Every structure is written in structure tokens, then in C-alpha cells.
Amino acid sequence: MNADKFKAHPGKSFSLADHDPRDTGDYKNKKMAKAQLQNDIDQMADLQYKLYAENTRAILIIFQAMDSAGKDSAIRHIMSGINPQGCEVFSFKAPSAEELDHDYLWRHYSRLPERGRIGIFNRSHYENVLITKVHPELLLRENLPGIRSVDDVKKGFWEKRYRQINDFERNLAENGVTILKFFLHLSKKEQKKRFLERIEKADKHWKFSYADIRERAFWDDYQSAYEAAIKHTSTDHAPWYIVPADHKWFSRVLIGNIIVSTMEKMDIHIPEVTPEEKVLLEKGREALMEE
């Protein structure tokens, strides 16, 4: 699969309008995609084993999207073959009082994956240039110097935050963390369909929140905020991928394929044992055979 067409390339013009949420790439049906996804899941499991054994690098996968775009189901399906010992998923909700007493990146530092592991952020530090940009009044809770009202939030404020995020991710990359960022690009029409399904099907009532309907009224504002965030923070060391999300089966196969391709490029290897360790291996064999 040519995943390059879904990548936001640093330094190049970017517009969400150039990305079709209904795109299914080279796949004509679910059956083709399902077979590819299973193959990628199997490969991912093997690569994760090597990553865990190598224990020198980590992978951070970030998911961002509008409500009902399929983040949860994508994570559940794609990571189904991963050993839970080597993978952790964190979902970031509204910040607590303690978290608000620190800078906005503080709570994300403690959730970063350890060496040898895969970490998944279901929503992330990007909320601080997305929901806060659409609702700048939320910034007042952070008690930031010089920000006493919404009128104090100028264009330069957001440019500074994009720079801070880029610096944060560059630091991670330079210390052995491979970063992948996925924006699940859902159409407004498909979101409406999924919201109605949550209302009409009893087993999906628990997923429905009227707050999602209120946020839908800010659709254009969110699209603008996502577009700006992706444009300013897609880098060579932490690229954004625009994943068409109207067809969940395609979202999953595309994400899985990108993860596997990235891990293959990392050239992960199980560490070779030293001559001294080989001697101990042989001694261990002899001891066991003599029992």
C-alpha cells in the first residue's frame, strides 16, 4: 500500500480538503483489507517481540479524531495480536486540578512508553491546540502568565504551543522513541449517521453523550484547528497521517500497514549473546541434561 499519499509532508502545503474521508486506497472490499490486516497483525506481534527483547527503543502511537471516528475500535482491532505486557493504552480526559497546576505536557510525560514497549495515546497533548483553540475560555483554568481573558490569547500563543509540541516530540525522537500520529478523518455526514445509530440501537446507548451533539456545532472550527495543528507539527521525526475514517475497515488496514512498515524500517533485532553468555547457556544445558 502506498501510505505516502496519506502523509502530511513537512514543508509542503496542507489542506484537509485534499483528503477524502471516503477513500479506500487500493482496496475494493472488506475481504481484501481483512486479509491484509491479519497479516500485518501477525507481523506486528513478531516485531513487538523483537522490540521488547532489544529494549533500547520505544514506539508512541497517537490517535486524534472527531467524536465517533473509530479510535477505540481501531486500537482494539489493530493491536489485538500484541502482547499486553509490551503495550499500554492511555486515554486522556479533561485535566484534573493537579494536572492544571503543571504545564500542559506534564501529565503526558509520565505516560510515555518505556524502552522496549509500545505506548498508545487515545487523544493526547494535541487537545491543547484543538479543544482549547475552539474553546479558548478553557485556557483560563491553566492560570497562565499574561492570560487573564480570552482576549489575551493571540495568534502568537498558538504558534508558541506548536513549537513547544515540536520540541517535546523532537526530544523524544532523539532519545529513542519512534512517533506515529494518526488523524482519523471523518466526514460530517458519516458522523451524523454514527450518532443516530448510537441513539437508535439500545446496545449503543451507553456511547451517546449529548455533549457530542453540542460539539458538532463547532465542526468547522475543529476542522480548522486540526488542519493548523497538522500543518505546523507534522515533522520527519513525528509525522502525521490523515486516515480516511468513513470506512472503518479501511482505517484499520491503513493504520496497521503504516505501523508495520515503520517498525520494519527501524531494523529491530533480538540482541546477540556475548561469548561469556554462550558459555553460560551451554553450562545451563549440561546442568539440565544431568538432572
Image (spheres, rainbow, N blue to C red):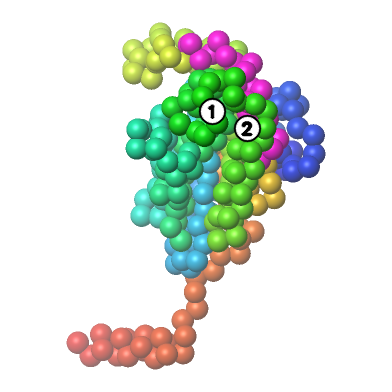
N-terminal of the two: label 2 or label 1?
A: 1
In this rendering, would 290 be left or right of 137?
Answer: left
- Which residues lie in the magenta part? 213-233
User: For residue 15, what is the image quadrant?
Assistant: top right
Instruction: Look at the image and say whether residue 282 sits in the magenta stretch.
Output: no
Calculate the distance from the C-alpha at mark 2 to the C-alpha at mark 1: 10 Å
- Reading the image, the residue beneath label 2 is 157
In this rendering, would 287 be left or right of 64?
Answer: left
Q: Residue furthest left?
A: 291
| Residue appearing at x 79%, y 34% in the figure | 13
Front in this rendered view, residue 200 or 166 = 166
Q: Secondary structure at mark 1?
A: loop
| Residue appearing at x 50%, y 78% in the figure | 272
Image marks 2 and 1: residues in contact by CB distance under 8 Å:
yes
- Mark 2 Cα-neighbour bin, 10 Å: few <14, some 14–19, many ≥20: few
Quarter of the rendering occupied by the C terminus: bottom left
Q: Is residue 254 above or below residue 153?
A: below
Residue type at tag 2: Phe
Front in this rendered view, residue 163 or 77 = 163
In this rendering, would 131 be left or right of 158?
Answer: left
Q: Residue furthest right?
A: 12
The percent position of residue 79, horizontal first and vertical second, equals 46, 44
The percent position of residue 191, horizontal first and vertical second, equals 54, 16
User: For residue 278, what is the image quadrant?
Assistant: bottom left
User: For residue 37, what is the image quadrant?
Assistant: top right
Residue 123 visible? The answer is yes
